Image (spheres, rainbow, N blue to C red):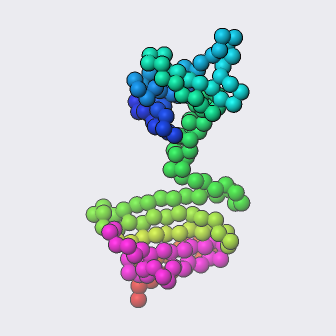
Amino acid sequence: MESDKIYVLKQKHWVRSGRSNIELLCPNDMTPMRQLEDEWGVVGFVDGCTVMCPDCGFEYKLKVKLDIAKSDVLSMLDAQKFQKMEMIDVDGINTPVLKKKVSTEDEKYFASVQINESRRGPQLVVYAGKKGQKEKAQIFVTPETKKMSFDHKDAKPTDIFTKITAEFIDESVSEIRKS
């Protein structure tokens, strides 16, 4: 979340102030709102609070206390960032799930590689194709069974490559070759 942006979330305006703080802003003049206290110094009511703009007097009634609302907003904004992050699966074999995408220099072709956990153990999946075309090749390499295969519903790997070779740790080789 950037500090020079105003975020509208659930029809309320929020801005980051400092590294780990966020402020609720008045929708009229963008002044930070403050939580109201009664004459005994008690903040709000049991299930929430009232916040007010010190400049224009605009008030909101929040369903939770302001500190909880701030924490919730930070969590929701962080969730958007977390959804875009690469996921690493450390369950099972302690091998991180990897995803890498590359393109040719002329940008005509692409290849994307990822390691997934399957019923047969880890599986390398290569997606490759010509940019701008819907059809792509999917090549599966399964180290546990020392096999390489492709998705017959998609483009054939030999439409893109002349030869694909998978060499396994025991030096066995699986190959798909254009005939």
Q: Which residues are magenta?
A: 131-160
Instruction: Give the position of the C terminus as an image quadrant.
Output: bottom left
86 vs 38, nearest the viewer: 38
Query: Which quadrant of the structure image shows residue 174?
Result: bottom right
Q: Measured along the vertical axis of the image, is residue 125 above or below residue 32?
A: below
The residue that appears at 69% across and 16% down in the rendered structure is 42
Q: Measured along the vertical axis of the image, is residue 34 above or below residue 131?
A: above
109 vs 25, nearest the viewer: 25
Q: Is residue 129 left or right of residue 42?
A: left
Identity of the residue furthest to the left in this view: 106
In this orientation, does residue 1 appear?
no
In this orientation, does residue 49 appear?
yes
The residue that appears at 49% across and 69% down in the rendered structure is 126
Query: Which quadrant of the structure image shows residue 146?
Result: bottom right
- How many labels were placed on the picture? 0
The residue that appears at 40% across and 30% down in the rendered structure is 4
Query: Which quadrant of the structure image shows residue 93?
Result: bottom right
Q: For residue 143: magenta?
A: yes
Image location (x, y in percent) of residue 88: 60, 54
Image location (x, y in percent) of residue 178: 41, 85
Image location (x, y in percent) of residue 54: 48, 16
Q: Measured along the vertical axis of the image, is residue 102 above or below residue 126?
A: above
144 vs 73, nearest the viewer: 73
